[in-house]
Image (cartoon, rainbow, N blue to C red):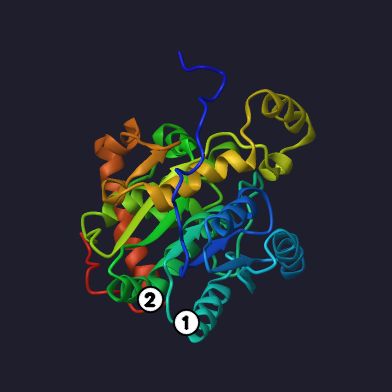
Amino acid sequence: MPSFFQPPVTPLPNGVNLHGQTAIVTGASSGIGVEIARQLLEVKASTVILAVRNLTKGEAVRRSLLAAKPEAVIKVMKLDTEDYKSVQNFTKTFRAEHSELHLLMLNAGIGTLKREMTPTGHEKNVQVNYLSNVLLMLELLPLLNSTADKTGARARVTWTGSRFHGATALANKAPLQSGETVLGHFDSEESFVAFARYADSKLLCVLFLYEMRKHLASDKVIVNTFCPGMVNSGMSDVLPIYLRLPMNAIKALRARSPEKAAWIALNAAIVAGPESHGEFLGDKAIVEPVAYIKSADGQKVQKMLWNETIDEMSRLTTIPAWISKV
């Protein structure tokens, strides 16, 4: 039986130096994102972009980081992952202002229990946690590739994930019906399972990466995802009060600090090597796919999702040559 308490984790090894490198951290106005940005500055990242929905909060974070590192180059940029147009505006502006990108940390995420739709027409958790992150990555991959060519070192993309992806509603509560699409299923009101939707959205991320690694080599860009474990952040604030109180009590006993969660994030982003490409890391170790993903149904959904995501992204951005349907 797994231990109630989470195992200890260690900080980055000595000697990590990101001097000359530019990093983007999404969701950088609170929680893990703030700590990731702070630690990137500690290892001498030359430019850190705080990609945030709320510019006022982002500027407050920038000021607090500059108070500790007055010599740092920290920029705040608007990014609302509920809306494709905001993603496109962000990437267009970034590419116009920066000739290199070494590290993209896809950290923005939500876990709402109420079914809401976004301007894109998709369910909010799926849009924020999955679709907008795919678009952001595809829009910036050419720059990541050119940076790798220029520097001779691999660029990196890492995605904040969750072990909860194994608790997806697809496994037993709301499986795909004949004729359904994956994205259509999650957009439908009938399939919405409130306490599984966060897991559902994180499953989509893992499925995409597992399929992506069959198409994209790790010679220029390493892409992975990780779970930081239970973290003492504001993610549980969306819970109703009768659940929030016991959850906060549990967090007080077992949750990691944002500082330790960022150690795990930066391990995936900086320390883990090509072997982590297209993999899910639980803490710092590569984890085997969960039972649902290995099942025949899971493999079918993985391919369906890949094809549907290609169709979705082709309406928004230039699809790279390495992407093909399966």
| Residue 193 visible | no
In this picture, residue 163 sits left or right of residue 326: right
Label annotation for residue 95:
1
Q: Quadrant of the C terminus?
A: bottom left
- Residue in view at x 32 percent, y 72 percent: 151
Among numbered discs 2 and 1, the one appearing first in the sequence: 1
Looking at the image, residue 143 lies above or below residue 2: below
- Near-viewer residue (195 or 87): 87
Q: Residue furthest front?
A: 15
- Near-viewer residue (221 or 120): 221
Three-letter amino acid code at the position of disc 2: Leu
Image coords of residue 288 (percent x, y): 31, 34
In this picture, residue 14 sits left or right of residue 216: right
Image coords of residue 220 (percent x, y): 27, 65
- Near-viewer residue (163 or 153): 153
Q: Residue furthest bottom?
A: 96
Looking at the rendered structure, the secondary structure element under dot 1 is: helix
Label 1 Cα crowd, 10 Å radius (few <14 / some 14-19 / many 20+): some
Gap in Å between the C-alphas at discs 2 and 1?
Answer: 8 Å
In this picture, residue 215 sits left or right of residue 260: left
Looking at the image, residue 287 lies above or below residue 33: above
- Residue in view at x 29 percent, y 39 percent: 297
Image coords of residue 149 (percent x, y): 27, 74
- Residue in view at x 63 percent, y 70 percent: 74
Looking at the rendered structure, the secondary structure element under dot 2 is: helix
Quadrant in the picture for residue 218: bottom left
Residue designated by label 2: 143
Could you tell me if the residues under marks 2 and 1 are in contact, i.e. CB atoms within 8 Å? yes
Quadrant in the picture for residue 258: top right
Label annotation for residue 112:
none
- Residue in view at x 22 percent, y 60 percent: 217
